[in-house]
Image: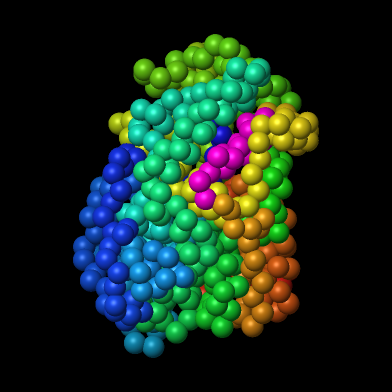
């Protein structure tokens, strides 16, 4: 099973079911009306559906701010704007400001690719309450995601097997099984979602963003992109530089790297996060329960994973915790320092033969809810990533590259390297080696990098600033841990971001927050 490290804000939440039929919308009759003139019909939001991850309907905010949802029509194929349409699901809560206090809509993309913004925004809204004083807070399910004509691949039972198999083959038989399973998954995506697969590229989503801007009634797009959302924002700025309003990129994807380079960067990033986790555990005044030294912590984890390769332990009944599931669970916990205590508990339990906590973390990574149902994040992640990226890596190439990945991380190198085969048999050709984000003439974009970020390593922020072009990207550094900076609640970071979005005050380039 390819280990999928989605570029999104990490959240330890239950996920829900993968749909077995494509939702209505894709393939609507050709339309004559100008979609830029459509009026959205905002209504009270329903509970998230299976593809979005399930759960209850969003509750009103403390000031009785009501969540509203609507469906926006967009061309299925942007090269044929009068052809078939798809429906894109939007969510908003109105600003608390009035009159001239209101700037417009602030559109969020929380990452992925494959994350449902409609399901995510209500969960994090309290973190953005200050921004709501001048903006309607808006998010959406990008095409192929959640309620926006989701990409559908395998069913729940098939996904259980997919995520349990050995993702780090040690011999020819295991390698063949991994390759066959990956091809079966990709073939299922083509069979169930053939019509939408060519139209889920980031460039398509960026054009959807500009349509959204117009339909929401804004002259400029005010935007907050996190993780993969920074790549989407960069592509938007490249296509529509004159339409960029106040924009912030947090947890920044390096736009200059191809998939292999990006995966190697993540491998180093997660090894750094593991090092920091181990050091943190042994530095506490009370005894670290999973090792006597930082190296001992890492050695014991390595032994656990080695043992699980041959002999899984009980996970969440009736499933067992395999080496692959344990690796995914550890990676998930390293997205945020908030999860480090949970990881410590999970490892301590696993050493005693109980893999339930690590499996819970693994399920969170893979979009599986407690009732055994999957959201469509894995399918959407694969479809968007493979449609974007031109390179295709076969098993022979991965095996050739394994030594460098193992040097970058003895613990994660194999798993992340083998994850590169995910697009090998994909039905749609990839668009480019990496995205073009050059945006001459754009308004300033605040680019926030976290020195301890495992999923989008810190170097990506500088690369994004350089790629956006002179006078566009403004770099801000946060010396912290975890994926992203704004949600760390660091006063310096939040003050700089809020100052720009609310008052248009661009912080000095090179500002450092600690």
Does 164 appear above or below 88?
above
Nearest to the observer: residue 497 or residue 492: 497
Rendering coords of residue 91 (x, y %): 33, 63
- Which quarter shows the C terminus? bottom right
Q: Nearer the viewer, residue 30 or 106?
A: 30
How far across and how far down the image is residue 468, in percent?
Answer: 67, 71
Q: Residue at x 47, y 64 (%)?
A: 205
Q: Nearer the viewer, residue 10 or 143?
A: 143
Q: Is residue 420 magenta?
A: yes
Is 19 rendered above or below residue 120?
above
When asked about the image quadrant of residue 318, the answer is top left
Left or right placement of residue 342 versus residue 25 in this view = right
Residue 400 falls left or right of residue 134? right
- What is the magenta segment's predominant secondary structure? helix
Q: Hey, which quadrant is residue 351 in on the image? A: top right
What is the magenta range? Answer: 413-428
What scheme was used to colour the molecule? Answer: rainbow
Residue in the image at 40% along x and 54% along y: 196
Percent x, y of residue 161: 43, 25
The x, y position of residue 239, in whole percent, is 57, 74
Within the image, what quadrant is residue 178 found in? top right
Q: Is residue 135 above or below residue 453?
A: below
Instruction: Count every numbered label the image shows and give the total.
Output: 0
Outermost residue, bottom direction?
A: 100
Q: Is residue 32 in the magenta section?
A: no
| Closer-to-camera residue (146/344) | 146
Residue most extreme to the top: 311
Residue 448 appears in the figure: yes
In this image, 287 relative to 162: left or right? right
């Amino acid at each position: 099973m390819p280990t999928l490290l989605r570029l999104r804000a990490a959240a330890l939440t239950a996920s829900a079911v993968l749909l077995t039929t494509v939702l209505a919308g894709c393939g609507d009759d050709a339309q004559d009306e100008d979609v830029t003139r459509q009026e959205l019909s905002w209504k009270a939001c329903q509970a998230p559906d299976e593809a979005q991850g399930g759960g209850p309907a969003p509750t009103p905010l403390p000031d009785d701010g009501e969540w509203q949802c609507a469906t926006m029509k967009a061309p299925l194929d942007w090269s044929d704007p009068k052809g078939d349409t798809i429906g894109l699901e939007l969510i908003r809560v109105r600003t608390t400001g009035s009159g001239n206090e209101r700037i417009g809509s602030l559109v969020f993309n929380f990452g992925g690719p494959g994350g449902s913004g409609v399901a995510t925004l209500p969960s994090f809204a309290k973190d953005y309450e200050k921004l709501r004083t001048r903006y309607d807070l808006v998010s959406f399910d990008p095409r192929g995601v959640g309620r926006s004509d989701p990409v559908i691949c395998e069913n729940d039972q098939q996904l259980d097997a997919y995520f349990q198999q050995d993702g780090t083959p040690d011999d020819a038989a295991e390698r063949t099984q991994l390759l066959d399973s990956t091809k079966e998954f990709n073939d299922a995506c083509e069979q169930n979602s053939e019509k939408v697969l060519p139209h889920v590229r980031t460039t398509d989503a960026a054009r959807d963003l500009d349509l959204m801007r117009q339909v929401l009634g804004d002259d400029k797009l005010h935007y907050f992109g996190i993780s993969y959302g920074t790549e989407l924002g960069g592509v938007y700025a490249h296509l529509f530089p004159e339409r960029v309003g106040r924009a912030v990129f947090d947890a920044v994807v390096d736009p200059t790297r191809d998939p292999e380079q990006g995966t190697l960067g993540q491998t180093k990033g997660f090894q750094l996060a593991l090092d920091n986790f181990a050091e943190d555990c042994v530095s506490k005044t009370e005894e670290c329960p999973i090792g006597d030294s930082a190296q001992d912590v890492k050695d014991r984890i390595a032994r656990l994973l080695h043992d699980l390769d041959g002999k899984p332990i009980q996970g969440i009944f009736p499933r067992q915790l395999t080496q692959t599931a344990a690796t995914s669970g550890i990676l998930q916990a390293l997205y945020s320092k908030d999860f480090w205590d949970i990881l410590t508990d999970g490892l301590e339990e696993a050493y005693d033969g109980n893999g339930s906590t690590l499996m819970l973390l693994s399920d969170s990574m893979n979009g599986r809810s407690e009732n055994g149902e999957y959201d469509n994040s894995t399918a959407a992640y694969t479809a968007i990533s493979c449609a974007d990226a031109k390179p295709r890596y076969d098993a022979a190439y991965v095996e050739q590259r394994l030594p460098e990945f193992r040097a970058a991380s003895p613990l994660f190198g194999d798993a992340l390297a083998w994850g590169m085969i995910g697009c090998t048999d994909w039905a749609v050709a990839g668009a480019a080696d990496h995205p073009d984000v050059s945006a001459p003439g754009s308004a300033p974009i605040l680019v926030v990098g976290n020195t301890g970020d495992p999923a989008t390593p810190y170097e990506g922020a500088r690369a994004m600033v350089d790629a956006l072009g002179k006078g566009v990207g403004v770099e801000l550094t946060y010396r912290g841990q975890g994926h992203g900076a704004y949600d760390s609640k660091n006063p310096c970071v939040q003050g700089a971001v809020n100052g720009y979005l609310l008052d248009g005050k661009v912080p000095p380039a090179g500002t450092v927050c600690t």
